[in-house]
Image (cartoon, rainbow, N blue to C red):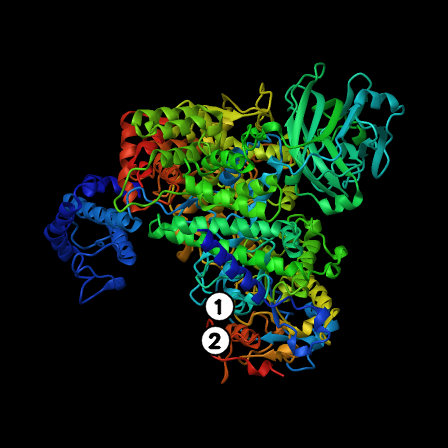
Amino acid sequence: MPRWSTLGFACLTLLTAGSAIAQAKVESTYADTLAPFLKRHCVECHGAEKSKGGVRFDGPMPDLIDVKLAEQWLTAKRMMAQGEMPPEGKPRPTADELTNVLAWIDDAAARAATITRGGIGRRALRRLTPREYVSTAMDVLGLSFPHFAPDLSKRLPTDTAADGFSNDSNQQSTQPLLLRRSLDLAEQLVDVALPVEPHPSPIRYEVDLREFVAKATDKPSKPKSIFVAYRIDVPAASDGQPSASLSLVGRWSGPNNGRRPQAVTRLDAKRGILLAPNPVIIGNPMECLMLKLPQVPNQGVLRLRARAGASIPAGETAPVLRLSIARQFTIVPIGEIVVTAPADGPAEYVLEVPLALVEADWKGIQRDGHLELQIDNAAALVAPTPLKPDDKRKESEIPTPARNELIVSSLSAEVVEAPSRSAILLAAAKEGETERERARRFLQSFLSRAFRRPVSESEVGSYLGLFDVERKRGVSFLAAYKASLTAALISPQMFYLIEPKDKEQRPLTAWELASRLSYLAWGTSPDEELRARAADGSLLREDELRRQLVRLLDDPRSYALCREFARQWLDLDSVLHIDQATVLAHLTIDRKEDIPWYEAVLRRDLVEESPRLLEELLRKNRPVESLGSCEIVVINDRLARFYGIDGVSGHQFRAVPAPADRRGGLLTQAGCIAAGSHGRERSEILRGVYLIERILGIDIPTPPGNVQPLDVQLNIDKNLRRLSPREHVETHSSVNTCAVCHQRIDPLGFVWDQYDMFGRLRRDKEGKLVVARTSGKLPDKTPFADIDEFRKRLIEPSSTTPRFADAFNRRLYAYVLGRSLDHGDDKHLSSIQSTTTKTEGGLRDLLTAMVLSEPFRKK
Amino acid sequence: MNHLRTTRRQFLSASGVCLALPWLEAFADAAPAAQAPKRAVFVFVPNGVNMWEWHPATTGKDYELTPPLKNLADCRKRFTVFSGLQHKAIPGHGELAVWLTANANYTAGKGAVTKSTISIDQHIAEAVGRQTRWPSMVVGATGGRRTISFDRQGEPVLADQDLSAIFAELVGAHGREKLPRRASILDLVSSQAAALRRELGKSDERKLEEYLDSVRTVEKRVQADIAWQATARAEVIDKDRLRLQSDPYAPANYAEYIDTMFELIYLALRTDSTRVVSFATTESEGGGPIKNLPCGNWHNAGHNTGDAPPEQKPKDYATLSEYDAWWTARLAKFLARLQGTTEGGHDMLHHTAVLYGSGMSWPAAHRSDNLPLLLAGGEGLRFAQGRHVAFNNQAPVNAAVGKAPPVNKDFGKNPACVSDLLRTIAERMDVPAPGFGESRRTLDELMA
């Protein structure tokens, strides 16, 4: 699409000028230029006598508000621009003629699209995405649990199609299921923020693990099943409470009958317990600490304090302390925290978990009468290097490579009432204040936070009305107040970004703009400063808008933008969902690179790499092209190990120089390659589709339903199996019906030929690198030899190759506007593009230009 | 405002009273059998079957049970197998969206999100749903848009995959004391939304209308929950059969997950929380969560067969056979559960029509002719069971021919299609559905 939009650009600027004049001009241009042109070149085949393809161009001026008509004209435009029409052998129009005609079609289509949409910046009522909803609710309730593992947004059903953005208002729909789940969640969150009553009996247990070790005299043996090595009673911190018990649980014989590398948890009288890495693939972890509480608290916040340190050998990663609730064979991870304190200087780590938000088998746990907490080191094991043929050692004699160890020297677990942050929600009554006044005072401030704007007296009045109704029904003050909060959380004002319509198109109000800006950059409601700028109206000034955007982007919370955009654009979440069975079938645990696929934390890192790169480039204001090609990689210790890069320690992402085999920005990230490969060994075509749609931004029609995937075709056809992968694909793209699209798709996928479905370098059975054949063609038939050349072709300006930057800008703009783009946005997009190109601006300038553009600032 | 609210509330609680009180055995025992509620359950299985051995060779009462149907031997008198029924659309892997809608304009490759037409379960639910707490129960392992149910506008009715949430809603575990509060909350937000509507433009109004509809639906449900609390009977819940923690993504849990979902369906019917259920077990495109049954990856096996004769692809057909049997075993368990419960002088199956089958027949070509379908129970709805009925002159699939038979074109004098079957079920539920999908008649030959 960018190919021809530049042609039509000149004419489009007319669009917003006095529309009557413009309309007259459109009509006169049609009469003067279009009609004669059509008569000369088109009507012979598409007219009253012949109407090939059911298409006619002999009528009066078309009104492109008619969707079918618009499609027909845009198709005609595309075919003319590409020289497919008029057909060969017919007289060709001159370049000038063509330019005018194409520009007219563009103009008319853009006008129609704007009218259909109802205004320049218009979008249908946009709902908060599940993630935005949860962040907003937590923020306005003053809740924050940074180490809480479960993703609460998963509780709400997602209803957007897989290839769009979840913030695309055109795709969103609100259904009873969503409202029901939101109501459930809102009730729970309010309960966490304002617990009903003080906890009946405090629960608090403390234990020094060095004592535990001292009591454990013998070395643990290695029995065959689940095994409790040691157990001690832990008396309660307050009198009169029953004791808890702490045990070291080991499972030395896993499903592989001992062949899996063994976790070696050690006891150290001076330091405590040294937990070895403990991958959970299926079922129970192998070694962990189990703290069994004699009561079942189902509300309040569980706070675990651990004095912990880590011993991290060179090239290894920091251990992750994971807290889970275990019942029988169901383990629900509830918290994770990375431990980086040195082995000899342990520090205190605190994990807070709101129990009411944990989806464990609470009924079963209540029946058991006790709660089992499990603490382990969530990192994968490395196997011993495989035996070489001349190695005479027995398997058991090969030492296990050193991995990180999580050293825990003391533990305390307590269940506390809700966090003390609830003062903004409800503080004590002022002197002489009635309970109704008190409720009103706090509702006022709560509502304006939840609705992201000042609230009117009558609005507060209605919510206070609910409070009154509840009070009359005889419930407590707190319960009645909580009902009002819950109602606010599921009200339409909370659910949607509400921008009331005017008769005329209008600029957004400062409050509306503040919300758009905040949800774009942070994925949550505006913070205090932004609200202040909205309140005094200064946000409407361009300089202030720029300043606020800079402030928001400089804040680490702007990672939300990079995360949501990149994950959805590149379909990265699919990496988390690659079927376990597929993973297990294709992996050996013999290679270091395999480990991420065993470690949930590391798979998440793979997903996080692309957004982190985007974040870094955005911070540095690097050009868009650097996403496709740059000299850095943004990784942490776990990814460094995966890629074989030395000298990176710690779980924080940071930029380091890229190694020779990963110099392609997004294109050489294992997460992207894995997402493009869909968990299939033979995935050239799927990769081609991924690249053409997501990187080149070309829409491909969906294939007919009864087409066999390539690996299935291979299974069926013996002759096909004898060919090389490249030949398979070539056979495939030569089939007539498929060729139209697949000639463009298939040659692309080879660019990743040196990487396997997990984004590792492809190796043969002996572990040697496979010689890859990475040459292929871009959709316009430009050849490339390997990934370096591919990147260059994407970036260099050329008339025919779709540029990566164009595709990226289009995607980003759709995300920024929160709706799918149509023809009416082309002119805004091209002016954004040309400004940034002219000023040689980077990603930050691009984003700024988008935010300053009319569609973002107008309703 | 206050005045308005009171009337609204009065209206709602009045309509709550209008709700038929849950029909339970307690008073059913005394009541004549005719008053037992009529129910319909639709169970969808993706990706077709091993067609060489699914359909019986002979028709009538004395047909021989084929291998996948052997699991149902105990209740062979209670179900009828159909041959020869088809959908006009060939939806490829989008068969979920066609199975109950018979949307003839469905094109392959667009997935289940294409604008569709109403599905028969929702059509029935529109008429009978008001009598129960939940108009219908729409569930599936993948959940969300991977559903077989579509509303009047053709929008997918999102399927629920969350066992514990369904159970919690079923028993009202969200706290009895919360229900009146929820009623007031919904009351308030719906008046807020109504006030907001005046400020918005046309297209926004449509979006807000969705919200209001959702509020109304949840509101009705709360009212029905309140009415139901009075009669709720915990003893029908058999905890041992509920494995609410089963993870549909963990291979070890597949059977548990499906069985638990069936048990929840049973409970919903048993407590008369709903009378219409659609269960989109999983999807054939990629297999959804349940991708690797004990028999292996059935989706790939289906493709692998190439619909070749059985002896050429023994391994893949073996996988498919195992797959078919795995599902019929689940079904058998569910049917046995319904048979094991008496109400009004009959077992529950007597009043429950259970349609089971796939939207695909030959898995490699993704054909939609001669679909594998069977209808169990529902004798109380006048269905005559215990037979194999071949429609449209469908010849038995014969392995001796050496290749998959071509699509049957000669339908004889009295043609029939899946739409006719769906319509017949609807009409036996007393919900007229003339012209549903491609339907031209009701299948009177199925009546006793």
> In the figure, residue A763 lies in which quadrant?
top right
Circle 1 crowding by C-alpha within 10 Å: few under 14, some 14–19, many from 20:
many
Give the left or right position of residue B314, taking residue B148 as reference. Answer: right
> Residue at position x 55%, y 60% from top?
B13
Out of A724 and B125, give the one closest to the viewer.
Answer: B125
Look at the image and tell me in which quarter the C terminus of chain B lies: bottom right
Q: Circle 2 sits in a helix, a strand or a loop, which is it?
A: loop
Query: Mark 2 and mark 1 in contact (Cβ < 8 Å)?
Result: yes
Of all chains, the one bearing label 2 is B
Among numbered discs 1 and 2, the one appearing first in the sequence: 1
**Residue B59 can be seen, yes or no:** yes
Picture mark count: 2
Residue reaching furthest to the front: A432
Residue at image mark 1: B102
Q: Circle 1 sits in a helix, a strand or a loop, which is it?
A: loop
Residue reaching furthest to the top: A344
Residue at image mark 2: B439
Residue reaching furthest to the bottom: B413
Out of A593 and A577, give the one closest to the viewer.
Answer: A577
Residue type at mark 1 is: Ala
Is residue A340 depicted above or below A191 in this figure? above
Percent coordinates x, y for residue A136 in the rendering: 50, 36
Percent coordinates x, y for residue A590 in the rendering: 68, 33
Of all chains, the one bearing label 1 is B
> In the figure, residue B54 lies in which quadrant?
bottom right
Residue type at mark 2 is: Ser
